Amino acid sequence: MSAITYEEVLTLFRETDRRFKETDRLLKEQSMETDQRFKETDRLLKEQSMEADRRMKETDRQLGKLGQ
């Protein structure tokens, strides 16, 4: 088995660094996408909750009229 040269070691370190940077970039990108999806889901849930609350109030109002 032959020893690797300094240049080969340097090339390996550079390639490893490049891969780490690419992985970091991808993780940040995915994190941002996940955050955007979470915010959109939160917005939709709030809208649905407000709509459900509005419907319950309307139903209560209508039931109140029937009971009079």
Image (cartoon, helix red, strand yellow):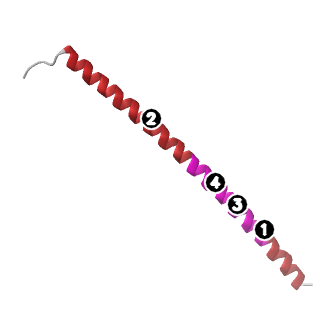
Residue flagged by tag 2: what amino acid is it?
A: Arg
Left or right: 44 as drawn, with respect to 27: right
Q: Which residues are magenta?
A: 36-56
Could you tell me residue 43's position as x and y percent? 66, 54
Badge 3 crowding class, 10 Å Cα cut-off, few under 14, some 14 to 19, many 20 or more, is few
Q: Does residue 29 sit above or below 17 in this rendering?
A: below
User: Residue, x 52% and y 47% (percent of image)?
Assistant: 34
Eye-nearest disc, 2 or 1: 2
Eye-nearest disc, 2 or 4: 2
Is disc 1 placed on a helix, strand or loop?
helix
Is disc 4 placed on a helix, strand or loop?
helix
CA distance for labels 1 and 4: 18 Å
CA distance for labels 3 and 4: 9 Å
Say which label, 2 or 1, has the lower sequence index.
Answer: 2
Quarter of the image holding residue 2? top left
User: Residue, x 84% and y 81% (percent of image)?
Assistant: 63
Say which label, 3 or 4, has the lower sequence index.
Answer: 4
Task: Kindly identify which residue carries mark 4.
Answer: 42
Task: Kindly identify which residue carries mark 2.
Answer: 25
Residue flagged by tag 1: what amino acid is it?
A: Arg
> 56 or 44, which is in the foreground?
44
CA distance for labels 2 and 3: 33 Å
Eye-nearest disc, 2 or 3: 2
Could you tell me residue 22's position as x and y percent? 39, 33
Could you tell me residue 10's position as x and y percent? 26, 18
